Amino acid sequence: MARSDAAHRPPHGASRLWVATGIGALVGFAIGATVYILLTPVLEASDGFVRELQGLSWNLVPGLTLLGGVLGWAMARR
C-alpha cells in the first residue's frame, strides 16, 4: 500500500486561496467589462478631452480583474 507523504501535499487551505483568488478575479473582470461596455458609447459620443478618455477606459478591465483577485485572496486569508 502506498504511503501518503505530507511533504508532497500542498498546505491545508492553499486550494481555498486559489479558488477565492480566481473567483475574485472573475468577478472583477465581469464588473470591469460591464463598465467598459456601458461607458464606451458615452465617451465616444462626447467631444474634446472626455472623448480621449475612451482609450484609457479599457484599463478598467485588467485593473478591476487584478483588484478582484487581490480582494478574493485577502478575504480567503482572513
Image (cartoon, helix red, strand yellow):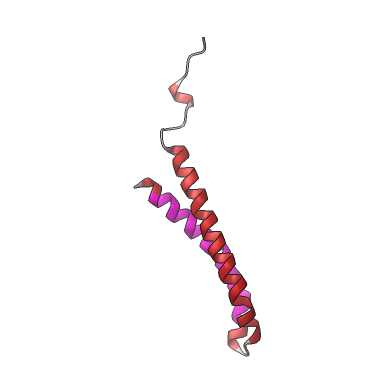
Q: Where, by quadrant of the figure, is residue 13 drawn?
A: top left
For this orientation, the residue located farthest to the bottom is: 47
Residue 34 percent location from the top left of the image: 58, 67
Residue 7 percent location from the top left of the image: 45, 24
* Residue at left offset 63%, top offset 75%: 55
Residue 51 percent location from the top left of the image: 62, 84
* Residue at left offset 39%, top offset 51%: 75
* Residue at left offset 58%, top offset 76%: 39
Vertical order, 27 against 44 (above or below): above
- Between residues 22 and 10, which one lies in front from this camera angle? 22
- Main secondary structure found in the magenta portion: helix
Does 28 sit left or right of 73 as displayed?
right
* Residue at left offset 63%, top offset 90%: 47
Vertical order, 27 against 9 (above or below): below
For this orientation, the residue located farthest to the left is: 78
- Between residues 14 and 30, which one lies in front from this camera angle? 30
Q: Tally the marks.
A: 0
Vertical order, 42 against 33 (above or below): below
Residue 23 percent location from the top left of the image: 51, 51
Tell me, yes or no, whether the highlighted magenta stretch contains residue 22. no
**Span of residues in magenta:** 52-75
Tell me, yes or no, whether the highlighted magenta stretch contains residue 58. yes
